Image (tube, grey):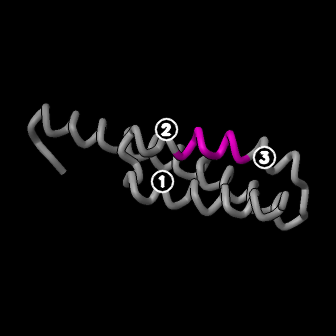
Amino acid sequence: MANIKSAIKRVRVNEEHRLQNQSFKADMRSHIKKVEALVESKDVENAKAALQTAVKKIDKAVQKGLIHQNKGDRQKSRLAQQVNNLSA
């Protein structure tokens, strides 16, 4: 454990940020799974609505630096493709 006051604070702040990031990423994954479940049950209208919220969550995670830009784009693309194939 750190002895210096600033190092102690750094450890505390890093832990708080880690927990916030963990929570945000879990929320993002939940929204992605919700879209996939709606696609699986062939619910077009609710899948489109859930896709919009999932895209917002993914974009926010990219903006915060929690996931890489390319990963966010890939996830959005795959979800959109699933929803579009469902309605076609």
Q: Quadrant of the C terminus?
A: bottom right
Looking at the image, tell me whether mark 1 or mark 3 is earlier in sequence order.
3
Classed neighbour count for the residue bearing mark 1: other residues with Cα under 10 Å, few (<14), some (14–19), many (≥20): some
Q: Residue at x 71, y 47 (%)?
A: 51
The residue to which callout 1 is attached is 72
Q: Is residue 58 left or right of residue 63?
A: right
The residue to which callout 3 is attached is 48
The residue to which callout 2 is attached is 60
Q: Which amino acid lies under the numbered mark 2 shown in the image of this protein?
A: Lys
Which secondary structure type mostly characterizes the magenta part of the structure?
A: helix
Residue contact between numbered discs 1 and 2, judged by CB atoms under 8 Å: no
Front residue (pair 85, 56) = 85
Residue contact between numbered discs 2 and 3, judged by CB atoms under 8 Å: no
Q: Is residue 16 left or right of residue 48?
A: left
Q: Is residue 76 above or below residue 37?
A: above
Q: Which amino acid lies under the numbered mark 3 shown in the image of this protein?
A: Lys
